Image: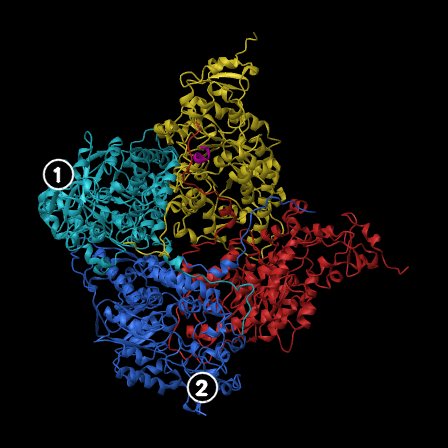
Chain colours: A red, B blue, C yellow, D cyan
Amino acid sequence: MTGKLTGADVAEHNSKDSCWVIVHGKAYDVTEFLPEHPGGQKIILKYAGKDATEEFEPIHPPDTLDKFLDKSKHLGAVDMGTVEQEEKVFDPEEADRQERISRMPSLAACYNLMDFEAVARQVMKKTAWAYYSSGADDEITMRENHAAFHKIWFRPRILVDVEHIDMSTTMLGTKCSIPFYVTATALGKLGHPEGEVVLTKAAHRHNVVQMIPTLASCSFDEIVDAKQGDQVQWLQLYVNKDREITRKIVEHAEKRGCKGLFITVDAPQLGRREKDMRSKFSDPGSNVQGGGDDIDRTQGAARAISSFIDPALSWKDIPWFKSITRMPIVLKGVQCVEDVLRAVEAGCDGVVLSNHGGRQLETARSGIEVLAEVMPALRERGWEKRIEVFVDGGVRRATDILKALCLGATGIGIGRPFLYAMSAYGIDGVDRAMQLLRDEMEMNMRLIGAPSVADLNPSLLDTRGLLGGHSVVPSDTLGLGAYDPLEAPRFNEKPKL
Amino acid sequence: MTGKLTGADVAEHNSKDSCWVIVHGKAYDVTEFLPEHPGGQKIILKYAGKDATEEFEPIHPPDTLDKFLDKSKHLGAVDMGTVEQEEKVFDPEEADRQERISRMPSLAACYNLMDFEAVARQVMKKTAWAYYSSGADDEITMRENHAAFHKIWFRPRILVDVEHIDMSTTMLGTKCSIPFYVTATALGKLGHPEGEVVLTKAAHRHNVVQMIPTLASCSFDEIVDAKQGDQVQWLQLYVNKDREITRKIVEHAEKRGCKGLFITVDAPQLGRREKDMRSKFSDPGSNVQGGGDDIDRTQGAARAISSFIDPALSWKDIPWFKSITRMPIVLKGVQCVEDVLRAVEAGCDGVVLSNHGGRQLETARSGIEVLAEVMPALRERGWEKRIEVFVDGGVRRATDILKALCLGATGIGIGRPFLYAMSAYGIDGVDRAMQLLRDEMEMNMRLIGAPSVADLNPSLLDTRGLLGGHSVVPSDTLGLGAYDPLEAPRFNEKPKL
Amino acid sequence: MTGKLTGADVAEHNSKDSCWVIVHGKAYDVTEFLPEHPGGQKIILKYAGKDATEEFEPIHPPDTLDKFLDKSKHLGAVDMGTVEQEEKVFDPEEADRQERISRMPSLAACYNLMDFEAVARQVMKKTAWAYYSSGADDEITMRENHAAFHKIWFRPRILVDVEHIDMSTTMLGTKCSIPFYVTATALGKLGHPEGEVVLTKAAHRHNVVQMIPTLASCSFDEIVDAKQGDQVQWLQLYVNKDREITRKIVEHAEKRGCKGLFITVDAPQLGRREKDMRSKFSDPGSNVQGGGDDIDRTQGAARAISSFIDPALSWKDIPWFKSITRMPIVLKGVQCVEDVLRAVEAGCDGVVLSNHGGRQLETARSGIEVLAEVMPALRERGWEKRIEVFVDGGVRRATDILKALCLGATGIGIGRPFLYAMSAYGIDGVDRAMQLLRDEMEMNMRLIGAPSVADLNPSLLDTRGLLGGHSVVPSDTLGLGAYDPLEAPRFNEKPKL
Amino acid sequence: MTGKLTGADVAEHNSKDSCWVIVHGKAYDVTEFLPEHPGGQKIILKYAGKDATEEFEPIHPPDTLDKFLDKSKHLGAVDMGTVEQEEKVFDPEEADRQERISRMPSLAACYNLMDFEAVARQVMKKTAWAYYSSGADDEITMRENHAAFHKIWFRPRILVDVEHIDMSTTMLGTKCSIPFYVTATALGKLGHPEGEVVLTKAAHRHNVVQMIPTLASCSFDEIVDAKQGDQVQWLQLYVNKDREITRKIVEHAEKRGCKGLFITVDAPQLGRREKDMRSKFSDPGSNVQGGGDDIDRTQGAARAISSFIDPALSWKDIPWFKSITRMPIVLKGVQCVEDVLRAVEAGCDGVVLSNHGGRQLETARSGIEVLAEVMPALRERGWEKRIEVFVDGGVRRATDILKALCLGATGIGIGRPFLYAMSAYGIDGVDRAMQLLRDEMEMNMRLIGAPSVADLNPSLLDTRGLLGGHSVVPSDTLGLGAYDPLEAPRFNEKPKL
C-alpha cells in the first residue's frame, strides 16, 4: 500500500546467501558487502533480516551506508510497525552498572587522568570499556608506554624567575596554547552518544588541536562543523587500497580547513586485542573486532586485509601524497631512528613516534624511548629543524609531557584519557582533564625552573634509566596466572604406600 | 551594652562580599584577605560569620592575625554568649580512632622509625595524617627517597678497634653530638597540640640542631623561647614577594640567635598532594591545600602564587641576602650538580640536596642519588671544603645516615619520622626515635669499622646499584589500580550465537 | 585347565624377591628388571602380584615389554576372571575435575597458547599436569625461558609493502610452511589417550615438522605410521649405554624416513622436579619419577643412571654417529657458545639451544639468551651457514618466534603448549594452537615490516635488555613462601614484666 | 637441718640489689654479674629469687656457671621441696603448636632445604623460631644472601663423560667428601633438646666438617666428645677482652683436636634483630637479646659491649694468635677485597666471606657477591693459592654451592638450614638435608658437565647479573607496610560544602 517494505519482506533475507538489514527505518542488501566488513561478517549476520539500528548507531558515522554501499543496495523505507520487536532480556550486569552510575564520584573528585580511567572502568558498558582499554597480546607495550616515563627523572634548576609561565608552542605552523593535542581514536560513540564532537568542543575551550580519526563514529563533516573560530584540526588517515577514495578524503579535508595530514603507518593490519575479544565472546553482537569467531578465525589474518587499509602502502607512495595536498605530511606510528631519517629524506614534515597505544605490535617500544634514540641522531646531522617530532602513548601527567619536550618533542598526543573523561563525565570531564593537565604543566614548569617551552632541554633530565634497556618489564599476567607455583610440604601429608 | 559585638553582628557577614570570622573571641574582617589565603578561600568561607577558632588553632601560629591582617580589619571583642553554638555531629571515624588510641602499642614496642609511622597512621586524625604523609602526584619520588638508600651497599672493614665510637661532627660551625638535624616541617600542631616546641625540647635532649620552619604552627618566638642552654637553631625561609617582610624575619632570627639561614628554593609554587586532597574531599573545613575545590581549581596554579612565596626569586637575590645577615646562607632544595657549583660561585655556605620530601616535583631524584653525583664533581675541582653539603629525604635508619656521610655529606636532615613519633607519643616518642637512631649509629659504625665520622669515606660503599639509573621504580599504584588485567578463558563460557 | 595362569598364581609373587605383574592379560616376571626401571621400583612394587595395566598403559608404548624384557620373563596369559578386582575408591578430587570438565570453556574461547595452559591446569589429572608443567628445583629457568623474550623489544620498519606474507622456510633441507616445529616431549598419553599421534596429525594439517621423542607413550612405529603424504619427522634420541640398541633405533628411524637425528645432550641424568614429586607424594602409584621414595632417595642420583641414558656420552662418540647414519646430526641441549663452535668443528649439522624446558639444570640460561651470545660469534667467524641453530623453551607467541628468527635462528621448537592444547581439546586444540600461531605470525610480520623470513634480521630488535644480565629474576616462590616478614608494632601490645 | 638453703632464703634476694637464682637445684648470687650478662639483666631479674632452670637450660652450656661465675657466688644446694612452684598458665599459642606438630609432614615430604624451613616455622616455639630466623634491621641482607645466587646463571658444557662424579675436596688440609661444612650457629638447644651434638652426629654420617660455635648450648667438650672416628671439627671464636680466657679456649681446642681456628671479625657488637625482639616483647622471660627493654635501651649499644666480645680486636692481634696455636687461622666475616688482601699479608690461612647470616650489618653485601670481587684480585696477584676462601650465607641448593665453587671458593658454610632440619626432625632431618644436598650436587655436576671439583671454573658461569649492582633489592616490608597507597575516587563521594 505505502510502497514500503514490510518486516516480513526483510526477514526472509536472513542468511549469508541473502542478507538484508534495517537501519534507521531503511532496508539494505549487504550480502556482497559481508566479507568486506571490517568488523567481521558474524556481527552483521546476527541481524540478518532484522533491525540493526541500535547496534549500528554507536559504531558508524551516519554517512557510512551512503559512502560505502552502492546505491543499488539501498532498498528503501520499511514500515517499522510491521517489524517484529525483540524482547529486551534483563541483564544483571547492566543493572549493576546503572547502580554504579547512580553512585558515581563527583567530577571534582577526579584529580588526575588516571582517576577518569578508574571511574570509566566502573561506569562504561563492559564491551565499550574493553574496546577502549585493550591492547595487543599481553598488553606489555600498552603498559610500558606509561611505565617508560618513570625511567626518566628530572634534574630541575633552582632560583630561576618562574613567576610568568608560558606554555604555548607551535606545531605544524599552528600556535597552540599548550603542547599537547587530542590524538585520533576510533568509535567515540561507544563512550558517549555524541561521539567525537565532544572532544572538538573541549579542545576549543583550551585552544588545543584535535586530530580527526578516519574511524570516527561521527562523520568527518560533523566533526569539522563542530569546530569554532580559528580552531585547528588535523586529519588522521588510513590509506585505502583504492587511492581515489583516499584522494577524495584528503582533498575534502584540506578544503574543510584541516592543517595537517597524519598518515597512519603502524597498522597495515589491525591488531588483535584479546581483552576486547574476551569481553565480547558471549555477545557476538557487539564484537567490533570480529574475534571469537570460528569461521573468521580460519580466515585468520587475511580477513583483516579489507580494502579499508592497504597493506601495500610503502615509501613509494609518499610523492603521490605530496602531489595531492599542501597540508604538511606527518607519518604516524614511526618506531625507530632509521625510519625517522628516511622520513626526512622523503620530505615529510613530521613523524609521530607511536606504537598505536600498544594496540598493534606487542613489545614494540614506547614512544618516549624511541624519542630518546631519535633526537640525538637528528641533532648529530643538524636535522632537528627539518622535521617535527611528535610522540604519543601512555601520557597521563604533565611530567610525562615535560619529559618528552625536554628530549626534543614538538608536541604530545593524548588519546585514551580524554575518551575515559568523556565516557564518564561528557564534555565537562574532558574540560576538567585538560584543565588538570594545564595546572600540572604550569606548576611543574615552575618546579623544573623552565618558564617557557624553549627553556626545556635534555640537561633537565636524568635518562640513565633508559640505558639499561627495559630492565623491569610489565609482567605477563596471563603467563603468571597460568603458572602453578611450587608448594612447601603439606601438613597432614603422609605417604600412603 | 558592653561595646562588644554580638554573634548576630558577625553572622551577617557570611559571604565572599563581606566575610567576618571570630577567632579567640575577637572578630576579624577577612574579605580582602580571602584571595591571599595560602589555604584557599573555601575553607575561610565555611566559617564566614561564625567562630573559626577550633579550625584556626592547630594550623596557625598565635601571632598570625597580628602579622598578616591590617589592624583596621581587627574588629574587636565579641560577646561569645551570643554566638550560636554548632552542634557536634557524631563521627564514626573519630570513634574508631579513639578506640585505636585506647589500644596503642607501648612506646617500648617501637624499634625503629618506621614503627612510629605505622602507629601514627592508625592514631592520627585522618586529615592530619594525610597532610604529613602525602607527596606529589603518584608519590614516586616520595617513596624513591627511602628506596634509593637500598641501592647502596656497604663494604665494611674488619679488625679495626671500634671500642670507642665518636659520632660527633660540626655543621656550619656548630659542634653536634650526632650528624643529623631536625629539618623544617610545617603545621606541627596537626600532630600534637603543643606543636614544634616538642621537637625543640627533644632536640635539646640529644644535642641536635633544629631547623625552624616558616610555616610552623607555633610562632617563631615560641620556638626560640623553648630552646635551652646553648642549643642551636637554624631558620628555614620562604621568601616573601615583599622583601621588607623577609628582611625583618631574617634580622629577627639572627637577633634571636639562629645560626644558619636555609632558603627554600624548591618551592616557587606549593605542590599538589592528591592523597591530602582526597582525604579532605568531603570535609572542606580541614582542607589545608584548598584542593577538591571547584572554584579554586579553575584558578588553577595561579592561586598558589600568593605573596607568601615569591616565584620570581632568583640567583640575583643572593647578594642581597648576604648583605642583610651574617648567618651562613644555605640553599635548601638543590637537585643537580650544576646548581651546587653555581652555589659555590655565588658564595653560599651550604646546600641541602632535597626534593622537599617528595612533596613538590614528581620524579625528582632522591637526595642521596644527587649527592653521589655532586661530591665527585666538587672533589675534582678541590671545592669540597668550600661548601657544606646537606641531604634530606627518606632517612629512616642509621645505615641511611652512614651512607650519606660516606659519600661526603656534612649533615642529614630528618623530618617526617619525628613528626610521626611526636604525633603518636609526644616528646617521649621523639626522644626515643632519636635514641634509636643514636644506638643504631653506634652499632653500625662499629660494624662498618669506622670509629669516627672522619673515618667514613666512599671506599666503604658499593654504589654500582646507582649507575644503572633507577632500574626499579616504585610502582604507580593509581595506574596499576586502574589497569584491568587480562583473563584466561572463563569456565562455563560458550559462545551464544 | 586352559593352561592359563590364575590370579592366585601371580599374587604369590608380590615382593622384591619375586615380582610378577599382569599387563593386558599377560603375566611378566620383572624381579630382575626392578632396579633398571627408569620410573623407580616403588611404583612396580605397588602392583607386585596384581594387574598393572591401568597404570602401565598411559606411560609406556605398547612394544615396551617386548623390547626391554627378555622373552624368558614373559610368563604367558592369565585367566583374568580369576584375578581379584580392586575396588575403586571414591576420589573427591577426581569428581571435582569431572565437574570442571563439564564446564570447560569452548575451544573458540582460547585466544593464545597461555589459554590452553590455563584450561589444561583445571581439566587434566593432577599428576599428569604436574608431570608436564614441572621444572627443575625452583623452576626459575622454566619461567625465565618465557620471561627472557620480554627483555627483547622490536624496532619495526614502516611503509614496507606487506600485502603478501611468506612465512615458509627451510630446516635441515626440508621446506616448512612456518618456522616452528613440534619438539619432542615424553609421555603423551598422560594428556590424551591417543598420545603422540595426535600431534602427528595436527602437524600434518599445518605442514609442520614433528620431532619424535624416545620416551613417547606411542611406539615409534605408531607415530611414523600416522604421518601422511610427504610429512617430515625427526628423531629425538637418548643414547643407551648399549650402543647396539642405539644403532638399531637410529637405523630403523632412517629406514622409516626420519630426516634428522636430534641427540639429547643436556640430560646425562634425568632432573628432579619437585612439583611433580609433591603431586605424587601420597600416590606412589603414579610416581613417574620415583621421588618421594625413601628407599630410592638413599640411592640418590645413582638410581637415575639406568642403562637407558648413558652419562658417559661424549664428543668422542660423534664420529660413530656420523658413521651409522646419513641423517643430519643435531645436538639438542647446547647452552653456550663454546659448545656451538665445537659442534661446528665436530661436523654436526645443527644445534638446539635449549635447557630441556627448564626441567634439567636450574638457573641454566634461556635458549633465546644463549642465541644472542651464539650468533654474533658464528658471524664473526663466517660460520653462520655451516650449522643450523634451533632454539626452544618458553615460546608462547609469534613475537617470541620472530625474535629468535631476527637473531638468526633457523627454527623454533614448541613443546608444552601443544601438549596442553592436546590434553584439553585433543587434535582440534592442537590445530587451533597452530592456527593461532600462524595468524599471529602473519599479523606480526606485517607489523614489523618484514614480508618474508629472509627479511628478519637483528636490526629489527632492541636487545639492550639482555646486556644487563638477568636483572629481574623470577622469584623463588618456595623461599619467599618460607620467609617470615617483619611486622609493625601490634596494637594491644604492652610489655608484661 | 640438711644444711640446704630453703626457697624462702633465696626468695628474699629478688631485686637488682641482691639477686639470687636457682639452677639445677643450686643457688647462685648473680648480683654483680647482672650488667655482664650478654642476654641483658631483665631476663635474669624476672627469675630473681626463683628457680630459673627451665629458662636457663636451653640457652646455656652446662658448664656456664662454673666457667663464668666466681666460686664465691656458688651458694650451694637448695631444698627444692621448699621452693614455691609457679603455676603453668594455659598458652593457646602453645596448644596450637602442639596440634600442628601432630600433623607434621613426614620427613620424606621434604625435598629441599627450604622445605625444612617451612616446616620448622610451624612447629618451633615462636621465640626460638624468631631467634634463628631473624636478621638485622629490615632483613634485606639476610634475604639478599639467597637472592644473590639467582643473579648468576650457568653456562654448562655438554658431551663430557660424567658417569663418575667425585665431589670430594680438601679444606685446611682435611679431605672432605663434599665441599660444604656445618658453620657455627648459636643456641642449638632452642631448636632441639640435645643441641649441637645432633649436628656433630649428622656431620659424621656424611663426612662433613663441623665448626663448633663459641655460643653453643652444649659445652665445647660435649660437642668434641660426640665426634666419631677421624671426624674433623673447627673452632669458631669470639675473642674475649681478657686474652687469657681466649688463650685457654684456643689451647684447649687445639688439644682436643680442632683443625682450624675461625676468628669472628664481623661482630664487634652483637646486632639488633627486631623480629626476634618483637617475638619476645610480651615475654621478656625468653628475651635472648635483651631488646624491648626500656632500661637496657637507654644504655643502648654500650650494653652490648660485655667482656665476652672485645670490640678493640684489631689486625695487631693476629701475630699473637699465630703465637698461641698451630691451627690454621681463618678470619670469619670478611666483606671486601681490601681485607682479604690484608689477611694474606698478615699470614692468615683463610677467610670466610660472610655477613653473619645477615644478622649484623644491614645492607652488607652477600658473600657470593664479595667472592666475585675477591677471586679475580687474588688471581691477578697470583695469590689464589696463598689463602683459602670460604663463603657462607643464603646457601639452599647445590646449585648455590656450585656457583661459589666455580668462582673459586674452597668450601661453603651452611648454618640455618641444618638448624631448621634439626628443630623439625632431629638428626634424621639433618641427615636427610645433607643427603638431599649430596644428591643435588651429584646431579648438577653431571648437568654442568664437571665430573670433579677441579673441573669447576668461572667459564661455567654467566655473572653479568652481578655487574649492574643490586638492581632488584629485596623489598623493605616494614616501609611498604607503613606506606598508605593512593586511592582512586571513591564512589558515593560528593563534596559536602
The three-letter code of the residue at mark 1 reads Glu
Q: Is residue B459 visible?
A: no
Q: Are marks 1 and 2 on the same chain?
A: no
Residue situated in front as seen by the camera: C52 or B331 = C52
Q: Quadrant of residue A298?
A: top right
In the image, the segment drawn in magenta is: C276-280
Task: Say which residue label 2 marks.
Answer: B79
Dividing the image into 4 quarters, which one contains the N terminus of chain C?
top right
Position of residue D405 measured from the top left corner of the image (x, y, whole percent): 29, 41
Few, some or many residues within 10 Å of mark 2 (<14, 14–19, 20+): some
The chain to which mark 2 is attached is B
Indicate yes or no whether the magenta region holds residue A286.
no
Instruction: Please name which of the two marks, 1 or 2, marks the residue nearer to the observer.
Output: 2
Classify D289 as above or below A114.
Answer: above
In the shown orientation, is residue D218 left or right of residue D144?
Answer: left
Task: Say which residue label 1 marks.
Answer: D254
For the residues bearing labels 1 and 2, Cβ distance under 8 angstroms: no
In the shown orientation, is residue D342 left or right of residue C23?
Answer: left
Say what secondary structure mark 2 lies in.
Answer: loop
User: Real-space Cα distance between discs 1 and 2?
Assistant: 92 Å
Marks counted in the figure total 2
The chain to which mark 1 is attached is D
Say what secondary structure mark 1 lies in.
Answer: helix
Residue at the image point whose x is 61% and y is 62% from the top: A101
The three-letter code of the residue at mark 2 reads Asp
